[in-house]
Image (cartoon, grey):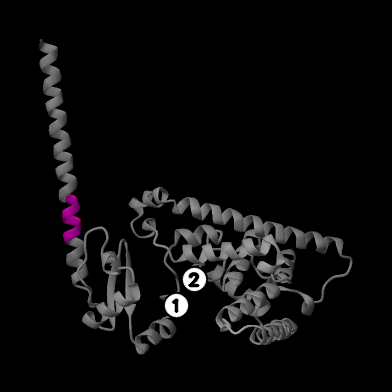
Amino acid sequence: MTSFLLMSQLHEMLIQLMTSLLFLLLCLFVAKYLIFTTATSKKLLPSPSRLPIVGNLHQLGTHPHRSLWSLAQRYGSIMLLQLGIKPAVVVSSPDLAREIMKTHDVIFANRPDSRVAKRLLYNYRDLSWSPYGEYWRQMRSICVMRLLSSKRVKSFRLYREEETAELIKKVTVQSCSCSTPIDLSEMLISLTRDLICRAAFGRKYNENEGESGRKLKKLLEELGEMLGVFSVGDFIPWLGWLDQVSGLNAKIERVFREFDHFFNVVIDDRMARQDDSSVGLSEDGMDLLDILLQIQKDGTNGIHMAKEHIKAILLVIRFS
């Protein structure tokens, strides 16, 4: 009987303790929200009212550009939005955009973290997503001096002439053989893709070159979709498990592995051909992959150029 009473008392104490803890957590959450709201209300930037946890995410809707325009009409050409845990300054005038992108560009140089970009770009080893700092400056130097210099662009003149002539021929044939309108937009996009591929890899890798070309095109389309998809974990980290449930994480991993396999095959094949060749290529005859492999071999740019760096750079070049 005594033990039963003790167990009952212990059970009641545990219930009271759990109730007290839950009440304390609720009070802390409310206090934190009130303090955060009070602190942000003192900021100079106008800001629309926000909800707990999601902030202003619910106000973006399915057409964010229209929603931002509507908010700008009410709050002015510069305003502060809270997107989950991430603050975002929105400007909608040329003068303010120039102030941010040119005058104070270093302050706004970094991009927000993106789970998709971090995984697909080998932990930000490319130039476009890497954080501003010494590594970014070294990568920029490589791109400006070695990959995108005036001399390098001129070396691809033959590619441009050949692809342009092929486009003109295709337009001429189609205009003479059919009465339906010609989709010049798609042709110009295809021309750009082929030029970039030839500059990067020395070949087109388009849908007319077999399974590898069709697969690469599909992967690039999926990459474009994923870079624009909404990832809950990017804005509300403790709800990141929703990306797992929705299948986003699995899709990211699948596309990453397929891209990684594609680039491994391309790079390994190029390295094998370079090893078998007894005659070295002149700089004018190199494509971008050759140059990156040369930088990796020489190690003269102050950066250890691993294969992951090369794959990240090539992916950004090809996607652009």
Residue situated furthest right in the rendering:
278
Identify the residue position indicated by label 2 in the image. Answer: 132
SS at circle 2: loop
In the rendered view, would you say 96 is above or below 34?
A: below
Residue 39: percent from left, percent from top: 20, 67
Q: Residue at x 21, y 72 (%)?
A: 48
Quadrant of image for the N terminus: top left
Identify the residue position indicated by label 1 in the image. Answer: 106
Q: Which residues are magenta?
A: 28-34
Residue 7: percent from left, percent from top: 15, 19
In the rendered view, would you say 275 is above or below 27?
A: below
Hey, what amino acid is under mark 2?
Tyr
Mark closer to the chain start, 2 or 1: 1
Question: Left or right of 314: which side holds 100?
Answer: left
Q: Foreground residue, 63 or 314?
A: 63
For the residues bearing labels 2 and 1, Cβ distance under 8 angstroms = yes
